[in-house]
Image (cartoon, rainbow, N blue to C red):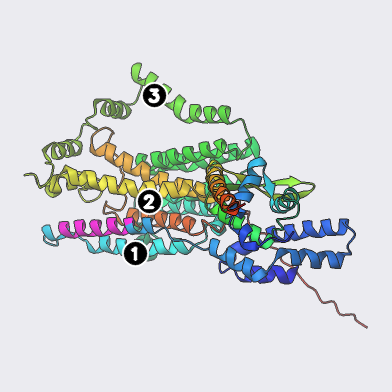
Amino acid sequence: MGIDKSLVSGSMTMLILKLLSEKDMYGYEMIDTLREKSQNVFELKAGTLYPILHSLEENDLVTVYEQETLGKTRKYYSITDLGKKKLSEKAEEWDTYQKAICEVMALGV
Amino acid sequence: MEKYLTTVTDQLRCKEVRPYVEKELRDHIEDQIEYNVSKGMKQDDAEKAAVKDMGDPVETGVLLDKIHRTKMAWEVIVFTAIITIAAILLHSNIWMERKYSIEFDDGAGAYIFGFAIMLLFYYIDYTFVARFSKIIAVFLMAVCFYLRMFDDNRYSFPCPMFALFRSVVLIDSLMLMYIPVFACILYKYRNTGVKGLIKSVLWMVVPTWYMLYRVGTFGTCLTLFFSMLVLISMAIYKGWFKVNKRVSISVLLGTFVGIPLVSTAIGYLTDTLPEYKRIWINAIFSSTGKADTTADTIRDLLCASKLTGKTAMNAAKILPDFDSDYVLAYISSEFGWSVGLLVICVVLFLLSIMLRISLKQKNQLGMMIGVGVSMVLVCNVVLNVLIIIGAFPRMSTFFPLISLSESNIIVTYALIGIVLSIYKYKSIYPKFVNATFPKVSIEFKFNIKEQN
């Protein structure tokens, strides 16, 4: 199903932080997992992902380390305590927002 | 793929970040190609599809450029400028009060020259310098050794340029520049295990020994040694040497702090210590400083100083080095102890900003250099204040930026410039950078013509 891009972009930071709160991942793995978990709804472009990841790193929400996996040195991203705090704030914001949307959409039904 | 990567990296104005961004994106594209091929695509089609999946290269490059830009530590610059102006006003006041009878020109020149040096260091890429750290360390020690050779007879310098250089540059100040170089050497020994740790300790011991037994400046020796000990302990704690952290730090501190302290204590209790050491220890524990005329004068000045305003005593007349080593005592006596305290707080605040900037560095080399640089200045502030209040024996120290000593002023600005350079590349360099010595390969081409 095609989804309006503006709906997704606002919550992308939250989704990436959520993925990283499960386990440390490298860029390609994140896109793959997001696609799989959203049942192909979120087709995140790598060109969008990396600026978000670099910005998260700049704001100390994630840290980076290198590790060899399957003979290749990969750059893994790991969520920080500050990132976890930010995630819970974002999740709370999202919860309020989606409840409000649902209530408005339920009007007159 | 190459066209995509070039287009992205072309958008990045900071050239230093380009290779790191390119590598990450290249890895991603290669993973995608591998996946596409595994799904039955041909290599060319798989590459085209992978590049298409990446999105618009210009958009990505512009977004990354917004994040990876060089930065300026304005806080450090503003506080340095405030302290500089205050120091120049203080020394020009001394100059005028003494009816222009002392040479202030050299001091004022040092502030201007120092500021220029700070900017020069800001423009130097510390990761590049790190590659030559061992050469710089040896060169630094060689210069100090050479200068020391002519110390007893300054007029025997082989050329006037050296004589001029020696008259301005103090070995003590020059050796403080060893600390950032030592941080680079530690970084080079990462992942080399116990061998690397032992080599690092040697790089710490040699200059300390040289300063203590050859140059004989205990203050600089203490500053160097303490700063390097902190750096090595930090490197061990951060797992740079991959050795048992608790054991290694205990052995290090036990050897270089515990054993000397215990042996000194035993020597003191059994009356086997040399007389000068005994006086020093008495001075530390009696909180009166080494019992000499200068220490007594400093104590008298501090006791007489008011909350604000001048005392009846003429500090400039009775206190030697009143504008350099003991400038804090002079300030307290001339303007009140609250002003002296304010000066200490402002300088410590500047140093705390520098330390915070360094500790928050993502790049580990920058972090280590920054901590080392901050430690050097913090050590000097602490030693200088302890000596002034009489809690430590007198020895040559300086209060950063305020003490009028050309050499120390210039070195302090250079050290601040290094922290500015570290902050500049805050968003550019990753956690670890390559600091190995560049390999130079020379190819000889011979054209052998066939001879008929």
Q: Quadrant of residue B300?
A: top left
Whole-percent x, y for residue A39 in the image: 75, 51
Q: CA distance from mark 3 to mark 1?
A: 43 Å
Query: How would you classify the magenta stretch by its main secondary structure?
Result: helix
**In front: label 2 or label 1:** 1
Q: Which residue is mark 2?
A: B173
Q: Which residues are magenta?
A: B79-94
Q: CA distance from mark 3 to mark 2?
A: 28 Å
Residue B273 or residue B91, whichever sits in front: B91
Q: Are marks 3 and 2 in contact (CB under 8 Å)?
A: no
Q: Which residue is mark 3?
A: B264
The chain letter for the residue carrying disc 1 is B
Residue B304 or residue B79, whichever sits in front: B79
Left or right for B225, reference B25 = left
Element at label 2: helix
Give the farthest residue toward the right. Answer: B452
On-image quarter of the C terminus of chain B:
bottom right
B220 inside magenta stretch: no
**In front: label 3 or label 1:** 1
**Residue under the point 74% across and 53% down:** A35
Q: Residues within 10 Å of mark 2 (few under 14, many from 20)?
A: many
What kind of residue is marked 2? Ser
Vertical comparison of B116 with A69: above or below: below
Q: Earlier in the sequence, mark 2 or mark 1?
A: 1
